[in-house]
């Protein structure tokens, strides 16, 4: 049971500290953010590759015009998880988000697993998006594919953007917020343009039938099949209600990353108010934009004729507004840039929280007195992202980002009723309504979407967690501050 020793909420709050206790920023993150900044960071990481690519793939192959419903279902699942995050973040405003919440409720070994899982989500996510950024910029500026394409042996574009955004991330949280804010304004403005300009070209015939009849689908065989098909003995289908739900599992990738807002709660001036606003504002705005853009795209073009690679730009080309394609490409570049930046910022905060607890070397996670950010751990993981983005064609590994995110969401949903039971008197400025029913629904929804991912994705995910356990046994278990403090108290009593 020593593996499941928890960290008290009081210890979490004491570690978080405040500016008055650490005026030079040494050891504590600086509180510089407001709800506006949090929504900016949230939109910065959520609106990216998902809306610019997944709309076409899922509409054409799985859901038809009902991809609009798929985005709404995925957004609802994300919203359920966000409500759970909001309660925990307002009660325990600290870096680490799901890692720290799990440490305070379930125990150390599970907290380590979720922290290791979050490293996978954000590091791999940043690398995937960096390669996508390189491809978009290469196409937009007609740069050589040998340096900016997915087939490049050394992807120079991906390497360059990672280096530039790493420098921004270590300069300070306010500097990062300013850059993210500019990028968010650009991509939200273009998304609104797509909706307002495209709605004039929506045709009822393109939306009929809204849910195409179900038909057999080729989803691969063996390890490439969704786990739920193998467990339940289901035959793969496209379209129909089953196709809409399958598409929801796929487009959920578009919502991944919003928990970055909770990771910034320790740097927020008024976390009890601003973090729930940041989380719910992010999901509300992102879902509205996703549903609006998806509706316009499937309304402008027959779903069977949608281009899978660039659905939005191609839809405008098909209705004679080719000039709008350049605007869409600019929005895509801005969207991908902000995603990479927020990924790098978030992974630094997770490493900082784990280093503060002794599960990673504390020297690595030290906060810079000059900039007030955990520069060392940010640079360390940026090197990993740089290597992956430069040399590794990631392809289907992007599914690992989805399964890692859903696993984190599931544990956060479980943590809400657990902490309600173990610490009923804890002050909770924001409370999840209808608990434990709503958290249970959130956990089940996340599990269902995880089961819709392929068997090979599950195997890769389990292999990553096994590697993490080896690291924990080799270092984290022996250097845990919580465990060492407990042993010192036991020795004093003896």
Image (cartoon, rainbow, N blue to C red):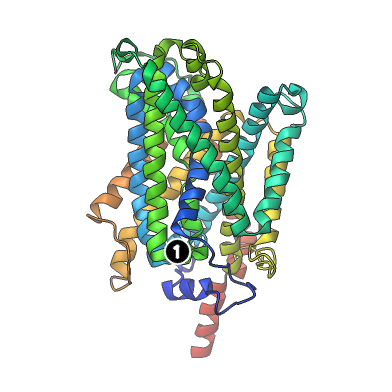
Left or right of 355, for residue 461: left
Residue 342: where, in percent of width, then height?
Answer: 57, 48
Left or right of 352, for residue 114: left
Work out whether residue 490 or residue 257 is closer to the camera in this orientation and state it: 257
Up/down of 115 relative to 14, above or below: above
Q: Residue at x 35, y 60 (%)?
A: 87
Work out whether residue 454 or residue 210 is closer to the camera in this orientation and state it: 210
**Visible residue check, residue 494:** no
Residue 173: where, in percent of width, then height?
Answer: 60, 58
Q: Quadrant of residue 239?
A: top left
Q: Residue at x 43, y 17 (%)?
A: 61
**Visible residue check, residue 270:** yes
Q: Quadrant of residue 485?
A: bottom right
Label 1 secondary element? loop
Q: Residue at x 46, y 32 (%)?
A: 191
Work out whether residue 84 or residue 172 is closer to the camera in this orientation and state it: 172
Category of crowding for the residue at label 1, using alpha-carbon neighbours closer than 10 angstroms: few (below 14), some (14–19), many (at least 20) = many
Up/down of 161 relative to 299, above or below: below
Reading the image, the residue beneath label 1 is: 107
Residue 2: where, in percent of width, then height?
Answer: 48, 69
Left or right of 92, for residue 19: right
Q: Quarter of the image for the N terminus: give it.
A: bottom left
Work out whether residue 285 or residue 144 is closer to the camera in this orientation and state it: 285
Q: What count of labels does the image hold?
A: 1
Residue 164: where, in percent of width, then height?
Answer: 71, 45
Up/down of 398 relative to 139, above or below: below
Q: Residue at x 44, y 39 (%)?
A: 255
């Amino acid at each position: 049971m020593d593996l499941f020793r928890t960290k008290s909420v009081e210890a979490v709050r004491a570690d978080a500290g405040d500016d008055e206790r650490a005026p030079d920023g040494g050891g504590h993150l600086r509180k510089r953010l407001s709800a506006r900044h949090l929504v900016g960071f949230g939109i910065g990481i959520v609106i990216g590759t998902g809306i610019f690519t997944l709309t076409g793939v899922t509409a054409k192959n799985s859901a038809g015009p009902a991809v609009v419903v798929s985005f709404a279902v995925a957004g609802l699942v994300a919203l359920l998880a966000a409500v759970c995050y909001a309660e925990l973040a307002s009660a325990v405003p600290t870096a680490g988000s799901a890692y720290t919440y799990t440490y305070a409720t379930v125990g150390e070994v599970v907290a380590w697993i979720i922290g290791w899982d979050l490293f996978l989500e954000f590091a791999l996510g940043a690398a995937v998006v960096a390669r996508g950024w390189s491809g978009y910029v290469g196409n937009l500026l007609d740069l050589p594919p040998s340096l900016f394409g997915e087939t490049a042996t050394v992807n120079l574009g991906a390497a360059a953007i990672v280096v530039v955004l790493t420098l921004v991330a270590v300069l300070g949280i306010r500097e990062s917020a300013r850059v993210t804010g500019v990028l968010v304004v650009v991509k939200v403005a273009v998304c609104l343009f797509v909706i307002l300009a495209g709605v004039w070209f929506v045709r009822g015939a393109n939306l009929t039938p809204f849910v195409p009849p179900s038909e057999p689908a080729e989803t691969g065989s063996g390890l490439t099949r969704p786990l739920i098909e193998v467990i339940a003995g289901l035959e793969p289908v496209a379209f129909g209600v089953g196709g809409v739900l399958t598409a929801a599992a796929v487009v959920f990738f578009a919502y991944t990353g919003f928990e970055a807002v909770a990771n910034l709660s320790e740097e927020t001036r008024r976390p009890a108010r601003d973090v729930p606003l940041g989380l719910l504002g992010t999901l509300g705005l992102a879902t509205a934009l996703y549903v609006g853009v998806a509706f316009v795209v499937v309304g402008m073009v027959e779903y069977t004729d949608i281009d899978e690679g660039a659905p939005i730009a191609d839809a405008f080309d098909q209705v004679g507004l080719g000039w709008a394609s350049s605007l869409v490409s600019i929005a895509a570049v801005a969207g991908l840039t902000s995603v990479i930046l927020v990924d790098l910022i978030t992974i630094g905060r997770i490493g900082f929280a784990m280093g503060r607890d002794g599960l990673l070397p504390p020297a690595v996670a030290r906060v810079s007195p000059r900039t007030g950010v955990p520069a060392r751990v940010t640079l360390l993981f940026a090197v990993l992202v740089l290597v992956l983005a430069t040399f590794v064609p990631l392809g289907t590994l992007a599914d690992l980002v989805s399964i890692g995110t859903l696993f984190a969401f599931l544990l956060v949903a479980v943590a809400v009723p657990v902490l309600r039971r173990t610490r009923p008197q804890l002050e909770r400025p924001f409370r999840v309504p209808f608990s434990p029913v709503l958290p249970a629904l959130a956990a089940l929804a996340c599990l269902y979407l995880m089961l819709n991912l392929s068997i090979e994705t599950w195997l890769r995910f389990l292999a990553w967690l096994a590697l993490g356990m080896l690291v924990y046994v080799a270092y984290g278990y022996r250097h845990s501050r919580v465990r060492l403090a407990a042993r010192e108290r036991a020795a004093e009593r003896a």
